[in-house]
Image (cartoon, helix red, strand yellow):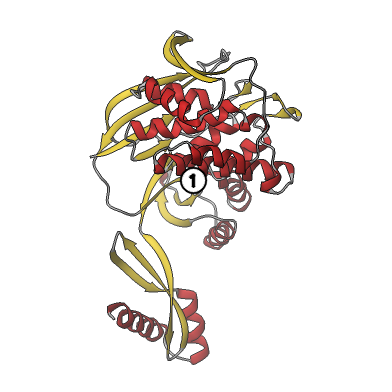
Amino acid sequence: MVRCGYFDCFSGAAGDMILGALVDAGCPRETLTEAVAQLDLPGVQLSAEKVTRHGLAATQVVVSVTPETPAKHRRLPEILSIIDAAGLEPRVAERAAGIFRRLAEAEAAAHGTPVEEVHFHEVGAADAIVDIVCACVGVAQLGLERITCSPIPTGSGTVAGEHGVLPVPAPATVNLLKGVPLAACDEPGELTTPTGAAILTTLADAYGPLPPMRICSVGCGAGTREGRGRANLLRLIVGEAEPEAAGERDLVCVLEAQCDDATGQALAYACQRLLEAGALDTFIVPIIMKKGRPGQLLTVLCRCEDVAALETIVFRETTTLGIRRHEARRSKLTREHVAVQTRFGTIRVKVGRRGDETIRAWPEYEDCAEIARQAGVPLREVQQEALRVWANEHDA
């Protein structure tokens, strides 16, 4: 069985919320306080208490700093040195260092400075170091081998930071959430902080709905503020799942549009435009609509962050009045292109693997079609030659 963790970010995520969820789900608080002691940060302590948010029980973890401890802005090398000197488990230290590197890159991009010159301000403070390191310790303590995260809401409005009033999500948070599914939310305030975004996006293996599992424990971590319309909580569901065959998995969006008065040429053109704009795939299926009218169903597979742009193309290039949308978890073969030298020239072969097993190999159509036109030979002859060469090299 595989030990799984699902972070349900229905109200965003921050470092203290992540720690609270880990403790509430079964990570002993003492394990985290020992990690804090290893960091050797003067005047820094960690405590945990039971609280309620909107009538729901949760654990709130507080990282406190004694008043006499001076606030300190740190650069990345100093933070990495603290982590390296703490004597943490190698996997924990590696993950914590990786999270801070991502934070440095996000801050550098937001402020237009080199990574090595970034002053971490809030995220370089002692409490952020504790949040990040203890999050990695908690994940290891709970034995989480695979982590899935829900789409992440960011909040709305503005937030006061080191550089003054900033929009929500903050610039560094936006950079950290590139390529990550976001959830719509009009709750005012900063629901997801740079620290919370960095931790989750570094640790998560996948994003989407709750995956199949047998639930073992559930933990809720509370944030410091009181949410207006929703409980300021982060939920962690820990469970066990059957091990899945090796391969790639991701979350895609499926768009569907019905058309009963569009020509085949118009729909073919729409498909071409969609693919050029980043759609993963498109296809058209004949259907019978109401009152027996013949129609066609256009389906588009795409990355969730590309939905808005692709929906615009569908509305502009087809006659549909509405588009259905849903998310789908996808399993796919690990793919790579292998160039082979044939008597016709160089041809790329797309190879699909599942673990160590090669499942499928097929020459790229465009390569074969161009060569077939130039050589004046049938397409299938070029394809067969490319497969023969690849198979000989593969067997060797």
On the question of residue 368 being in view, the answer is yes
Q: Amino acid at mark 1?
A: Leu
Seen from the viewer's position, the closer of residues 123 and 166 is 123
For the N terminus, the quadrant is top left
Residue under label 1:
255
Seen from the viewer's position, the closer of residues 375 and 29 is 29
Seen from the viewer's position, the closer of residues 26 and 56 is 26
Is residue 205 left or right of 311 when viewed as pictured? left
Q: Residue 325, how many percent across, how many down?
A: 48, 40
**Dot 1: few (<14), some (14–19), or many (≥20) neighbours within 10 Å?**
many
Is residue 265 left or right of 219 when viewed as pictured? right
Q: Is 177 drawn above or below residue 219 in the view shown?
A: below
Is residue 157 left or right of 258 when viewed as pictured? right
Q: Residue 374, how many percent across, how many down?
A: 52, 89
On the question of residue 12 being in view, the answer is no
Q: Residue 115, how many percent across, how many down?
A: 66, 47
Residue under the point 56% across and 56% down:
278
Q: Is 7 drawn above or below residue 91 in the view shown?
A: above
Residue under the point 41% across and 85% down:
382
